[in-house]
Amino acid sequence: MWIIAKLTCREILSKRIFHITLFMSFAFLLFYAVATYFAAREVGEDFTNRPVSADFALVQSFFATQILGVGLYFASFVTALLAILSSVGSIAGEIESHQIDTMLARPIHRRSVIFGKFAGLGSLLVIYAAFLFLGVLLINQWIGGELLRVEFTVVQAAKALAIFVMQPLLLIAVALLFSSMMTTVNGGIVLIILYGIGFIGGFVEQLGVLMEKPTLSNIGIISSLVFPLDSLFRKMTVYLFDSAGDPLSFAAQGLFGSLSTPSGAMLMYAALYGCAALWLAVRRFSSRDL
Amino acid sequence: MSDYVIETHRLTKQYNNDAGCRNISLAVPRGTVFGFLGPNGAGKSTFVRTLLELLVPTDGTGHILGAPIGSVKSRENVGYLPELFRYPEWLTGRQLLETHAGLCGLARDERKKRIPFLLDRVGLSGRGEEKIRGYSKGMQQRIGLACALLSNPDVVFLDEPTSALDPIGRREVRELMNELRNEGKTVFLNSHLLSEVESVCDYIAIIHKGELIVQGEWRKLSAVKVQVEIALAPHADGLWESLAPIVVKAEPIRKEDDRSYRLVTLSDERDIPVLIHRLSEAGISLYHVIPRIPRLEDVFMYWVSRKESESFDVDYR
């Protein structure tokens, strides 16, 4: 398994798409830092002459969480994209090219390939996701100034990070399932549509809670059951902003926060969802013709 | 220890379109080069891929070195060069071998000796540090061969191993197969190139339209007909008719000066001295008698047509 994991890491690191993504990620962080710097300066000028009040605290909190939320949302999106692109063809592509034949003619179980790929892709994507998450957080803390800096503890950040890096792991597990079942293109399409369902369902749910429309909220819940990725992001924001149950913070978090808090059961569901996908991938791959 | 390294019983792999291989019962003796022959699409690769668990059999059983196919143990002592060889292009030749050495559990010390030895053995000495993407098709097949031999396996499956090689490369692979046999290894050679099989194989099996036609020692299977080429002086008409039933057929080959050359098919090898005696008795001068060993192509066609005629008989009975 570890040899396959090592090979998988090596493969991704050797791909141009990874180098480009890494370069663009630095570019994003640079842009985000510049945007945060100017936002902090502009907002600072606006608020200089205003008296401190509850409204002021609300608006300031809104700006701070929105700026951080949008950064994290984009980080989550880029991580998801990289996870999908790097993993959906990792088995299907090798089956199509017959590259996997000589490997499987060795005395190894097929499950080692699935677990090896998961370990290789997972470790790289976890590092990448953590790098983006911490990058966005550090920019917020250092450049955001007093007005845009979101207050949170190290424990909060650690919890949020743990949930944040679960996102690529979930995506990789599902991608490996599709990769062991269908061609790269088909698997990619299905996974992107699933991602879209989770993405849109998440927003619909937030709007449903905001407008007190249970149907919209239920659509969001169903989409989370179909693909619980968005729930992870929402849970992460709850951990980071620590505002669940506080009506003031609900309003402050806006579209990139979490108006409805995903439960602990949903977190468990997401973890089981990933494990089930991996288990099915092993079963499917072990019994299929190559 | 069994005398057979590969044994299958009615091993079948059928696809939805009825292609594949059916009811293949095969026994491959240890320490031989075993030629698995058949035209393109006959089911040769399907059979090998089923043995190596790349395809799931639809029926039947099989064993490699005593272990049931599909088990990890059955692949512990096996090397494989696929027909459609493709390796990670971003690895160097040496890195590829290192990776496969890890997959087959080769000890580090052993790797250090084995990898340079094999790179040299397949003619890639000094090219091991180059990326595979820079290799020619022939070089990729060579690194594939090195990969197949990496764990010093007892059984090596070579599926069309010379398809991308030039004549020199082909000769080298033939030599390699002979060396492996001398070391007591068994080579399972999948090929549609009859000349390749003819020159190295001790045993052959012929597969046609997914079914096993015949298997056995090449020397015995090749004795499908006894033929001699003879050169003799002019003779009276009706000579060959008078020599029936010893002579099955006497086809004229050519005429040179006053000698006529014929390819004579006899019903039995023991009839060769009888033929010479009878011609001598008839006072016909005999200039030469050369036994003609049938080419594999003839043997192949013989067994295939025999099988087809049997099927034909069955259909109309």
Image: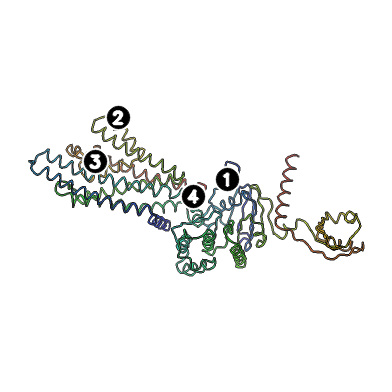
Residue denoted by label 1: B58
Q: Are marks 2 and 1 in contact (CB under 8 Å)?
A: no
Residue denoted by label 3: A257
Q: Residue at x 54, y 60 (%)?
A: B138
The kind of residue tagged 2 is Thr
Cα separation between marks 4 and 3? 41 Å
The kind of residue tagged 3 is Gly
Tag nearer the camera, 2 or 1: 2
Give x and y (percent) for residue A68.
22, 46
Q: Chain of mark 2?
A: A
Q: Are marks 4 and 3 in contact (CB under 8 Å)?
A: no
Crowding at dot 3, Cα within 10 Å, few <14 / some 14-19 / many 20+, comes out as: many
Q: In the rendered structure, find residue A242 and report the number of the disc placed on it.
A: none
The kind of residue tagged 1 is Thr
The kind of residue tagged 4 is Ile
Badge 3 and badge 1 both on one subunit: no
Badge 1 and badge 4 both on one subunit: no
Q: Chain of mark 4?
A: A
